[in-house]
Amino acid sequence: MKTGARNSLQAKVTSIKSDEIMSLVKFEVTAPHEMASVLTTESVKEMNLKVGDKLMLVVKAIHVLPIKE
């Protein structure tokens, strides 16, 4: 199956909570992956980012799309 999403993570289902209409499915990411972000150069300079810096990534997404292989 081909998807339009460009970033994908391997994951394991850890819990499912369902009612009649909706279900909440929680996942544990099982494989390390690389992520990327596009920032303004001004932001990079203001944050004084350097290769090797450790930081936290906050992911803001509209959807998480589970694909069962």
Image (cartoon, rainbow, N blue to C red):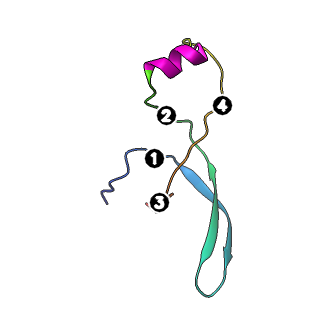
Residue with the mark numbered 2: 35
Q: Quadrant of the N terminus?
A: bottom left
Label 4 vs label 2: CA separation?
A: 12 Å
Label 3 vs label 1: CA separation?
A: 9 Å
The location of residue 2, given as percent across then percent down, is: 30, 57
Q: Earlier in the sequence, mark 3 or mark 1?
A: 1
Residue with the mark numbered 4: 56
Range of residues picked out in magenta: 41-48
Residue with the mark numbered 3: 65
Count every numbered label the image shows and give the total. 4
Residue with the mark numbered 1: 8
The quarter holding residue 7 reads top left
**Numbered disc in front, either 4 or 2:** 4
Q: Earlier in the sequence, mark 1 or mark 4?
A: 1
Label 1 vs label 4: CA separation?
A: 19 Å
Closer to the camera in the image, 10 or 23: 23
Q: Earlier in the sequence, mark 2 or mark 1?
A: 1
Q: Earlier in the sequence, mark 4 or mark 3?
A: 4
Q: Name the amino acid type tagged 1.
A: Ser
Label 3 vs label 2: CA separation?
A: 17 Å
Q: Residues within 10 Å of mark 2 (few under 14, many from 20)?
A: few
Q: Name the amino acid type tagged 4.
A: Met
Q: Name the amino acid type tagged 2.
A: Met
> Please, which residue is most extreme toward the left here?
2
**Local SS, label 4:** loop
Closer to the camera in the image, 16 or 39: 39
The location of residue 26, given as percent across then percent down, is: 65, 61
Closer to the camera in the image, 4 or 47: 47
